[in-house]
Image (cartoon, helix red, strand yellow):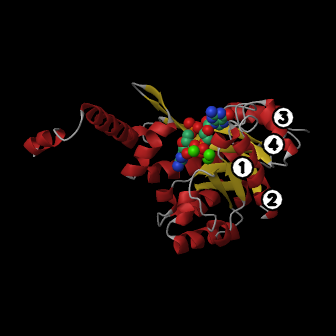
Amino acid sequence: AKENGRQGYQFFTPTMNVRAVERQFIAEGLRRAIAKDELSLHYQPVIDVRTGEITGAEALTRWTHPARGPIAPDDFIPIAEDSGLIIPIGRWVMREACSEAQRWTDAGLGPITIAVNVSAMEFQDHGFLTGVLGILADTGLDPRRLVIELTESVLMRRVEATAEVLQSLRERGVRVAVDDFGTGYSSLSYLRKFPVDALKIDQSFIRQITTEGRDTTLVTAVIHMARSLKLRVIAEGVENVDELAFLKEHLCDGAQGYLFSRPIPGPQFMALLAASSVH
Ligand code: C2E
Ligand code: CA
Ligand code: CA
Ligand code: CA
């Protein structure tokens, strides 16, 4: 077997070899990450464009590797997805995010929503729905406070099963947002089939919103479309006041980005919430 493995390597270029070793390293580290308490969540505020108030937070997973330090989600989430580890990780994220959000409510800092990213594999796992409902019951979080962020690709796959799970979630009041809107499929037919509540315009469109004519037109069109479909629309990656002014003028509902805050640890987010809430 060793012999075969060696021969196998001859098919790879040196760079591919390094990448394969790196992926293996990440996957093995991830396998231990939950048990060893190396994962944590950061929270990024979602702002009401009109009032400037915090209306919610998005939970974003952070991994601090014991030897290597912080590893970016873009470097480990895809590997977690390929290896199936996204299922236990996603379950951990959901529980952690819901109990943190309930902490805010208990502290009288609400009501705000908590958005959790859910990968295709997690969403299509048979245990997903019961898992989420169990976590809501355990943490006591009002289902209406939870937003599940799905990408367009999830909504294009296994349509019937997806519709069923979405319907069950919505019956309980859980909301669904389409993440990275505009980067996935060109077909918008899923918007007709699925009961979604919000669109999140991908940050790649926001980046040049005030300078690149095409992006200006696209974002304006998406906002108008969302509004006429009675969907909430949130702009991601808002970094400066010109972008915010543009979004305000074009009646975008929500905004998220470094202009307001980077993703921050739970206690820091709670302090931000306390400082910004009107009592
Ligand atoms: P995403 O869901 O699109 O999350 C937004 C990303 O944009 C986050 O990167 C956030 O830190 C970053 N961001 C926010 N505001 C700005 C801004 O103003 N400028 C710029 N340049 N970036 C901004 P992050 O935390 O590195 O996460 C990357 C991706 O990893 C996420 O993209 C999401 O797809 C995935 N991810 C993170 N946590 C989870 C998780 O718990 N589960 C799953 N399935 N995926 C996750
Ligand atoms: Ca997201
Ligand atoms: Ca996004
Ligand atoms: Ca993304």
**Residue 218 badge:** 1
- Are circles 2 and 3 on residues that touch, CB within 8 Å? no
Q: Label 4 sits on what residue type?
A: Leu
Extreme residue in the left direction? 3
**Residue 207 badge:** none
Quarter of image, res 151: bottom right
- Check disc 1 and report its element: helix, strand or loop: helix
**Residue 247 badge:** 4
| Image position of 231 (left or right of 87) | right
First of labels 2, 4 by sequence position? 2
Q: Choose mark 2 or mark 3, whichever is in front.
A: 2
Q: Label 2 sits on what residue type?
A: Arg
Separation of residues labelled 2 and 4 (CA atoms): 13 Å
First of labels 4, 3 by sequence position? 4
Q: Label 3 sits on what residue type?
A: Ser
Separation of residues labelled 4 and 1 (CA atoms): 12 Å
Residue 150 on image: x %, y %: 59, 56
- Are circles 4 and 3 on residues that touch, CB within 8 Å? no
Quarter of image, res 230: bottom right
- Are circles 2 and 4 on residues that touch, CB within 8 Å? no
Q: Residue under circle 2? A: 227
Separation of residues labelled 4 and 3 (CA atoms): 21 Å
Q: Residue under circle 3? A: 276
Q: Badge 3, how many Cα within 10 Å: few under 14, some, many 20+?
A: few
Above or below 8: residue 124: below
